[in-house]
Image (cartoon, helix red, strand yellow):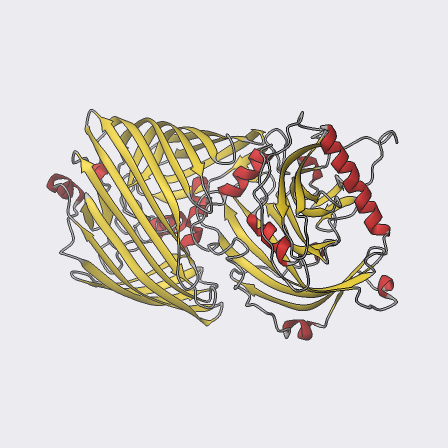
């Protein structure tokens, strides 16, 4: 288990709450960790014993008779795919009055509650611990979701006595020591990391880190996840908990913030996407030894103001104002949710930390199960996934195209090497490539278009081969990828000439150079600042091909900036995609553009080039939120035409200078369905089309 230093945010929050006056303190550099035998060294066992005594004494002590406080928090519910963009589904805001009396009576009164939905969800209620404060680092048993998510987990600092006949549940190891200078104190507060893992990994238990005040052995911070055996709900992939405490009056470590995150997937089916509930509470306005009602112990642990009063509560922040602070500022744009998963797998490398079955049915998306297009006709597929260990995964998929009578196969292996690096091995037969500069639609809409309109929005060619790759993840969403392999390209054929319904003719299929290539690829993704709120991302990738048919380097760049003044109900989005091919004039070194996805108001993929650029500026705002949303945009594009031979075979050329378009339309039903009218400028036309929210395309 790596020695993670506690985050700066935890240190700042601890110092800021050191006294009611809120005066801060300085920080000394960490001192080196004590050299010891590692797990269960005498120093670690001594600190654990002191912490257990401190917890027991605190519960019985009258030194702090009572306190009151106010909590405010947010509960975020969002889609969390392994690749692609997260999508916010719902956000709730909660406020509560907290009253505590010795010995351990905690009562919470919910005074504020409001909810905003960004997706058509059925109404459901959260478990109480999603919006109430965990009492003093949990009791002897750790339970999440009223025992429906996690149950039967013994607290690592619960009272335990050597020689009692009871079995010790955990291993402990010391980490770094940090020192904090507090106002008015001559000596710094020294805080020690204590890593925890279960002795029997097949039993319920936690694995993570606890920070302890070396003087009092009180808990300062806890951050942990659970073993597989801890999970009750079969949908649970992982549950993560973070508790932070601040020092009051130099004696009492009281809660500053709490974060509980639960990620779930469909049991038995690996779709490459889950849902996450992230509940974040912040505590303020402490009053120590405040008088409370005599019958506090007789009240229910959680009570509620009437719904009208909760809805009218004057929250100190807006519903969406804390998303950036809570790690969700970019939740509705392209993000990299793999970072959390990589960290959890590295932390639990030899301990199963997911509650999902290790063997599951696997689908990349709806289109991998069923799709229809002019190059395959009807195509069916399915797959499976297997997790031989918490840091390893094997996936395999197979499909069959009835139009060509040919199969497609894919198999991949990945291993998380550490918190930053992931190894990926893959082999594939007849993987579908697309010659477009950017996707034109979701796969689902493409199949519907092929069935009804004679347009499947994909310019297919086939790739077969294998690859060895590495991903390195940095802070936030940033990452670097590189790999190498062998690949064979073959042209697709137009096996279906017209749509089954409507009898509309399909476009021709663009040919490529059929040959084997040595392929080298690399890419990077970076976070971009977005002034005025929102988030941005930039991506750059390059692939070098070398074979008997020729070779070259293709470079693809993309940028997206989103500003959301006032939250997701209003948005200004700037996006751009560019391509350049350096080398021999291979057809697959060209890219197609025009129409939906790149340049609306122009013939769909009527332009081609070895250099192509497209971008747009789109503004949107709820009219009758969240059911009707107005959208309008300006779009520009240019391509150089590329090699004339390729242009003739593809029936596509360059743009007449810089081509443009304007568009206007509506987003319907939480902006999931979009209807737009566009007019091309510079050789364009009027176009009316319907699409789905691009944030959901990967799952379609």
Residue at the spot 46% in from the left edge and 67% down from the top edge: 569
Q: Nearer the viewer, residue 416 or 83?
A: 416
**15 to the left or right of 393:** right
**579 to the left or right of 94:** left
In the depicted structure, whether residue 342 falls above or below residue 548: below
Q: Is residue 511 visible?
A: no
Residue 404 place in picture, x, y as percent:
33, 33
Residue 495 place in picture, x, y as percent:
29, 38
Q: Which residue is farthest left?
A: 644
Residue at the spot 28% in from the left edge and 54% down from the top edge: 598
**154 to the left or right of 24:** right
Residue 425 place in picture, x, y as percent:
43, 28
Q: How many marks?
A: 0
**Figure quadrant of the N terminus:** top right
Q: Nearer the viewer, residue 585 or 297?
A: 297
Q: Nearer the viewer, residue 151 or 385?
A: 151
Q: Nearer the viewer, residue 392 or 36?
A: 36
In the depicted structure, whether residue 130 falls above or below residue 309: above
**700 to the left or right of 485:** right
Figure quadrant of residue 293: bottom right
Residue at the spot 78% in from the left edge and 44% down from the top edge: 141
Q: Is residue 583 visible?
A: yes
Figure quadrant of residue 575: bottom left
Residue 406 place in picture, x, y as percent:
36, 30
């Amino acid at each position: 288990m790596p020695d993670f230093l506690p985050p700066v945010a935890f240190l700042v929050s601890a110092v800021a709450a050191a006294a009611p006056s809120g005066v801060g303190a300085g920080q000394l550099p960490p001192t080196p960790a004590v050299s010891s035998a590692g797990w269960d060294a005498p120093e670690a066992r001594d600190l654990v014993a002191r912490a257990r005594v401190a917890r027991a004494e605190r519960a019985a002590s009258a030194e702090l008779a009572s306190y009151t406080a106010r909590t405010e928090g947010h509960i975020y519910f969002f889609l969390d795919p392994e690749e692609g963009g997260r999508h916010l589904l719902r956000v709730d805001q909660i406020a509560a009055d907290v009253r505590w009396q010795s010995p351990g009576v905690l009562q919470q009164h919910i005074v504020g509650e409001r909810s905003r939905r960004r997706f058509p969800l059925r109404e459901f209620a959260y478990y109480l611990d999603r919006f109430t404060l965990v009492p003093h680092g949990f009791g002897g048993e750790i339970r999440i979701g009223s025992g429906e998510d996690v149950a039967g987990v013994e607290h690592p600092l619960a009272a335990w006595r050597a020689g009692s006949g009871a079995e010790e549940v955990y291993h402990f190891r010391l980490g770094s020591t940090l020192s904090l200078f507090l106002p008015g104190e001559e000596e710094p507060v020294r805080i020690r990391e204590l890593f925890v893992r279960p002795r029997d990994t097949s039993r319920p238990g936690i694995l993570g880190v606890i920070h302890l005040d070396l003087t009092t052995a009180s808990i300062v911070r806890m951050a942990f996840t659970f073993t597989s055996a801890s999970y009750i709900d079969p949908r649970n992939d992982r549950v993560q908990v973070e508790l932070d405490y601040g020092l009051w009056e130099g004696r009492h470590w009281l809660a500053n913030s709490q974060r509980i995150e639960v990620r779930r997937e469909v049991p038995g089916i690996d779709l490459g996407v889950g849902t996450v509930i992230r509940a974040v509470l912040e505590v303020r306005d402490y009053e120590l030894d405040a008088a409370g009602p005599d019958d506090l112990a007789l009240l229910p642990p959680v009570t509620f103001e009437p719904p009208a009063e909760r809805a009218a509560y004057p929250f100190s922040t807006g519903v969406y104002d804390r998303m950036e602070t809570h790690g969700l500022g970019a939740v509705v744009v392209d993000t990299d949710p793999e970072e959390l998963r990589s960290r959890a797998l590295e932390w639990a490398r030899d301990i199963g930390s997911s509650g999902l079955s290790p063997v599951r049915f696997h689908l990349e998306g709806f289109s991998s199960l069923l799709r229809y297009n002019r190059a395959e006709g009807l195509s069916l597929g399915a797959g499976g996934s297997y997790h031989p260990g918490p840091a390893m995964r094997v996936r395999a998929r197979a499909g069959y195209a009835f139009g060509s009578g040919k199969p497609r196969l894919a198999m991949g292996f990945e291993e998380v090497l550490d918190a930053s690096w992931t190894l990926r091995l893959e082999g594939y037969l007849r993987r579908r490539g697309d010659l477009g500069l950017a996707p034109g639609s979701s796969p689902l809409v493409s199949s519907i278009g092929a069935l009804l309109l004679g347009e499947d929005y994909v310019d297919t060619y086939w790739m077969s081969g294998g690859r060895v790759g590495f991903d390195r993840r940095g802070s936030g969403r940033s990452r670097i990828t590189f790999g190498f392999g062998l690949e064979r390209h073959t042209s697709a054929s137009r096996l279906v000439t017209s749509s089954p319904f409507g009898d509309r003719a399909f476009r021709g299929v663009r040919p490529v150079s059929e040959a084997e290539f040595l392929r080298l690829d690399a890419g990077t993704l970076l976070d971009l600042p977005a002034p005025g709120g929102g988030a941005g991302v930039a991506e750059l990738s390059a692939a070098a091909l070398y074979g008997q048919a020729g070779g070259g380097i293709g470079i693809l760049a993309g940028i997206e900036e989103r500003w959301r003044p006032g939250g997701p109900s209003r948005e200004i989005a700037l996006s751009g995609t560019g391509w350049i091919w350096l080398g021999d004039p291979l057809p697959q070194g060209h890219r197609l553009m025009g129409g939906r996805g790149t340049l609306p108001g122009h013939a769909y993929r009527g332009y081609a080039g070895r250099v192509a650029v497209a971008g747009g500026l789109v503004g949107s705002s709820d009219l009758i939120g969240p059911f009707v949303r107005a959208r309008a945009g300006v779009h520009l594009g240019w391509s150089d035409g590329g090699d004339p031979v390729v242009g003739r075979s593809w029936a596509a050329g360059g743009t007449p200078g810089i081509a443009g378009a304007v568009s206007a339309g509506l987003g319907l039903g939480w902006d999931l369905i979009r209807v737009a009218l566009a007019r091309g400028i510079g050789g364009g036309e009027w176009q009316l089309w319907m699409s789905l929210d691009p944030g959901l395309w990967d799952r379609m």
